[in-house]
Image (spheres, rainbow, N blue to C red):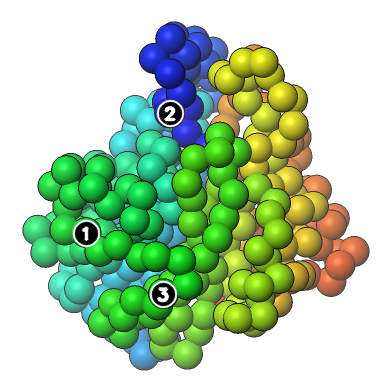
Amino acid sequence: MSRDTWARPERTGRRDFLRAAAALSVGAVLLPPGTGRATKPVDSAALRAQRLAWAGVRLRLGQDTLFMDPLSDPTVWEAALKDPLVPMDVSGGNRFVLVTHRHSDHFDPVAVRQALGDTGTLVCAPDMAAEAAASGFRVRSAPLYEPLLLNDFTATAVPAADGYGDPQVSWVVSGGGRRVIHCGDTLWHGSWWRIGRQFGPFDAAFLPINGARFGWRKPVSDVHAVLTPEQAVAAAVVLGARLLVPIHYGVAASDDYQEVPDAEALLLASARKRKVSVELARPGEWLTWQART
């Protein structure tokens, strides 16, 4: 959920939020490549997945790299974001970036440019293709439910629901014998069942969990604009996810942006009740594809 997609008068509130958050957090730092508890898998034929900052994920398959919602611009969240920023280092192979929606914490042109270099391709929903192309990127448009072959990756845009009401998609990506889904910062919606039936089961579901409430749009609704931890677990059940990997949480609170307190603890408690496996991957860590908390 971006803070800068509302009308211009609201931007003063955004600056106030960032100043307030700076006092509550030590700020985002740059994380050296490969940092983390989990050891990078060595099987080059298998799909590998690395969690990045905020909602970002990197997939590796052979020499090719595919990013989803990468974030590397420290000015997007400034000191409010507790996650370390992971470098978009790429060596060789084909490069792809999938973007769920146009909000600046999910479509970060700085990160996209670093990830793609001069030859990579940005993949997005049709509604933001012109905007992405105007930023100088090579763009492929992805209508809902139409699979795209990206070398050995197959990517399909599926429905999502945005807390601002803006267009948003989730991404189903398969390759190397694995299938994952990345859900940006969606809230609960009614398409989970169709996605699960058509594409499940998933080896991993990257699901937002911070249940954010925001006050930039008036009148304030005071309802969750992103999946809560309990809703993320429910989505994992419906999708048939073998593993839930939480993303999109860890921002210092202010009057205009509040996350669910203790989101990780709530997620784990709900997951235990519903027998859902969770892997808590920190930014920079590669998935082990096993439950890890």
Q: Nearer the viewer, residue 155 or 44?
A: 155
Q: Mark 1 — residue?
A: 139
**Which type of secondary structure does the marked residue at label 3 adopt?**
loop
Q: Is the residue marked by circle 1 packed among few (<14), some (14-19), or many (20+) residues within 10 Å?
A: many
Numbered circle sitting on residue 275:
none
Q: Nearer the viewer, residue 221 or 176?
A: 221
First in residue order: circle 1 vs circle 2: 2
| Separation (CA) of disc 3 from disc 2 | 28 Å
Q: CA distance from mark 3 to mark 1?
A: 16 Å
- Which comes sooner in the sequence, label 3 or label 2? 2
Q: Quadrant of the C terminus?
A: bottom right
Note whether residue 290 is visible.
Answer: no
Specify the quadrant of the image occupied by residue 147: bottom left
> Of residues 278 and 144, which is closer to you in this image?
144
What is the three-letter code of the residue carrying label 3? Glu
Question: Residue 103 sits in which quadrant?
Answer: top left
Up/down of 97 relative to 75, above or below:
below
Point out residue 74 in the picture as x, y percentages from the top left corner: 34, 32
Question: Residue 5, which numbered label?
Answer: 2
Relative to residue 3, is residue 293 drawn left or right? right
Residue found at x 36% / y 90% = 45
Q: Secondary structure at mark 2?
A: loop
**In the image shown, does 50 or 170 lie closer to the viewer?**
170
How far, Cα to Cα, is label 1 from label 2? Answer: 22 Å
Disc 2 crowd rating (10 Å Cα; few below 14, some 14-19, many 20+) is some
Q: Amino acid at mark 2?
A: Thr
Mark 3 or 1: in front is 3
Q: Residues within 10 Å of mark 3 (few under 14, many from 20)?
A: few
Residue shown at the point (48%, 50%) measured from the top left? 168
